[in-house]
């Protein structure tokens, strides 16, 4: 389980590694107070681009038939849809009770075995996060992987999840690194920003930002920070004070 944060020296947030060094989602802080999260890359990433949570598995994400589970139980057995599960695919993710008895609860997952498509899967819960309300055969659950696992470029036309941060350097697909979530960062710009005003993820260029237009047709894209220091130029990289995750 995560606790506290990792103190990062200058430049450490730009170092990728083929071997995992920290739990995914670990919070790091550099000497300037900038905040980062530890991720795995689901595809090759360039420096200074907004990344997002990977897509969920449609046959795993909700309405899974759930075996009766007593209050205080430390594992839950669900029946998968037509997609297999790999070993620890949902480690440090969440089990969500989306309908029926126990609905509205989310539980932290410690790990899971591999399972074939349409087979049962026994999900182990993190110590202390035991079942609060007993589940019955009428309970339906879904599985969500760690949101910092296999992050990908924020796709303007195919949004899979929340903004997870901004890449600090070029990252090799399948490698581990840090993405920045708070503080001053260099970020790709789609439309020139105005210093001191909010910026959001772009609806036209993958991984980029543009000014937040509360009265326009794309006012619902997530805001990720405030334009700072320089008025960025289209296709250039500008300074953004990120406000994604403190």
Image: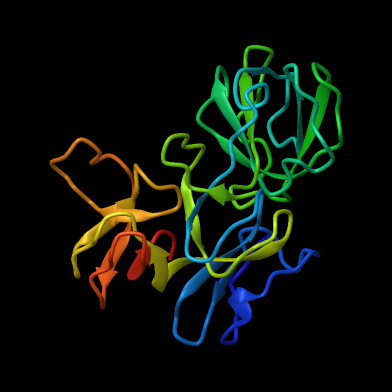
User: Based on the displayed image, in which of its 4 quarters is residue 76 positioned?
Assistant: top right
Q: Residue at x 70, y 37 (%)?
A: 72
Q: What is the quadrant of the C terminus in the image?
A: bottom left
User: Based on the displayed image, in which of its 4 quarters is residue 218 positioned?
Assistant: top left
Q: Position of residue 175 (x, y in %)?
A: 73, 60
User: Based on the displayed image, in which of its 4 quarters is residue 226 positioned?
Assistant: bottom left
Judging depth in this view, the residue of 236 and 194 nearest the camera is 236
Q: Residue at x 48, y 47 (%)?
A: 154
Horizontal relation, residue 190 to residue 15: left or right: left
Q: Does residue 48 lie above or below 13 as drawn?
A: above
For the rendered model, the colour scheme is: rainbow
Q: Position of residue 117 (x, y in %)?
A: 81, 20
Judging depth in this view, the residue of 177 and 140 nearest the camera is 177
Q: Does residue 111 lie above or below 137 as drawn?
A: below
Residue placed furthest toward the left: 215
Counting labels gives 0
Q: Residue at x 60, y 23 (%)?
A: 62
Horizontal relation, residue 3 to residue 79: left or right: left
Q: What is the quadrant of the N terminus in the image?
A: bottom right
Q: Position of residue 38 (x, y in %)?
A: 62, 64
Q: Position of residue 205 (x, y in %)?
A: 39, 47
Horizontal relation, residue 79 to residue 181: left or right: right
Residue placed furthest toward the top: 138
């Amino acid at each position: 389980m995560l606790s506290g944060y990792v103190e990062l020296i200058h430049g450490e947030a730009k170092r990728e590694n083929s071997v995992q060094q920290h739990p995914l989602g670990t919070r790091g802080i550099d000497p300037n107070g900038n905040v980062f999260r530890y991720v795995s890359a689901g595809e090759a990433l360039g420096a200074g681009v907004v990344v997002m949570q990977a897509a969920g598995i449609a046959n795993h994400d909700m309405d899974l038939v759930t075996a009766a589970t007593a209050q205080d139980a430390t594992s839950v057995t669900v029946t998968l849809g037509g997609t297999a599960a790999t070993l620890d695919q949902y480690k440090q993710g969440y089990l969500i009770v989306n309908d029926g008895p126990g609905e509205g609860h989310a539980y932290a997952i410690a790990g899971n075995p591999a399972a074939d498509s349409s087979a049962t899967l026994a999900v182990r819960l993190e110590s202390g996060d035991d079942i609060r309300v007993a589940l019955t055969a009428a309970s339906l659950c879904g599985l969500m992987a760690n949101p910092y696992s296999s992050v990908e470029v924020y796709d303007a036309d195919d949004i899979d999840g929340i903004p997870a941060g901004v890449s600090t350097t070029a990252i090799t697909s399948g490698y581990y690194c840090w993405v920045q979530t708070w503080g001053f960062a260099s970020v790709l710009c789609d439309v020139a920003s105005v210093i001191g005003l909010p910026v959001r993820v772009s609806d036209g260029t993958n991984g980029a930002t543009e000014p937040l237009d509360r009265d326009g047709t794309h006012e619902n894209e997530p805001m990720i920070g405030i334009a700072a220091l320089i008025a960025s130029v289209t296709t250039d990289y500008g300074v953004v004070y990120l406000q994604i995750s403190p």
